[in-house]
Amino acid sequence: MKVEKNKVAYFHYTLTAVDGDFSETSAKSEPVAFLVGHGNIMPALEAALSGAEAGDEVEVTLEPRDAYGERRPNAIQRVPIKHLMSSKNKLAPGNVVKINTAEGVRDATVVKVGRFNVDVDTNHPLAGKTLKFQLRITEVRDASAEEIAHGHAHGAGGHHH
């Protein structure tokens, strides 16, 4: 079965920033599951997986515009500490925090910590980076009517209700 619209595809990945300052893998966890054709992953990544089958390995390098976008220099904001979601981590420059906004919860990177406010960079941590994905398709199956109606894969590696 091929990766195509209204199929659920499962994959493991290794993601590295081409500049070498970031790397992550799903190798020791459940494979990622996504409903093909419903905007669940980056469009360029989905296009690279299109037509692949279980067992296939795909490597793709994405420029910032096709991944998390270019860095926006005006994305530094001063936020009252009370707007941060509770965190186990101490507030320190470089830490990623969650902020309550009018549009919902957003991730941001701490730039500077004050007594009552924190300056955060609201760019995605990988914005501005060229990313290399090494992907291994582990399974492709038909999506259920419920998954198609909800617009995402359910179960392990997907969305849980």
Image (cartoon, rainbow, N blue to C red):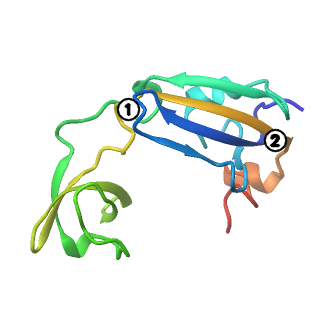
Badge 2 or badge 1: first in the primary sequence:
1
* Callout 2 amino acid: Thr
Q: Residue at x 73, y 42 (%)?
A: 11
Residue 138: which disc?
Answer: 2
- The amino acid beneath tag 1 is Gly
Q: Residue furthest left?
A: 115
Furthest residue to the right? 1
Q: Nearer the viewer, residue 126 or 161?
A: 126
Which of these two is toward me, 101 or 122? 122
Task: Residue 28: give x, y in percent of width and height.
Answer: 69, 54
Q: Residue 96: name its quadrant.
A: bottom left
Quadrant, the C terminus: bottom right
- Tag in front: 2 or 1: 2
Label 2: state its secondary structure. Answer: strand
Of residue 15 and residue 153, the one placed in the foreground of this image is 15
The x and y percentages for residue 148 are 74, 48
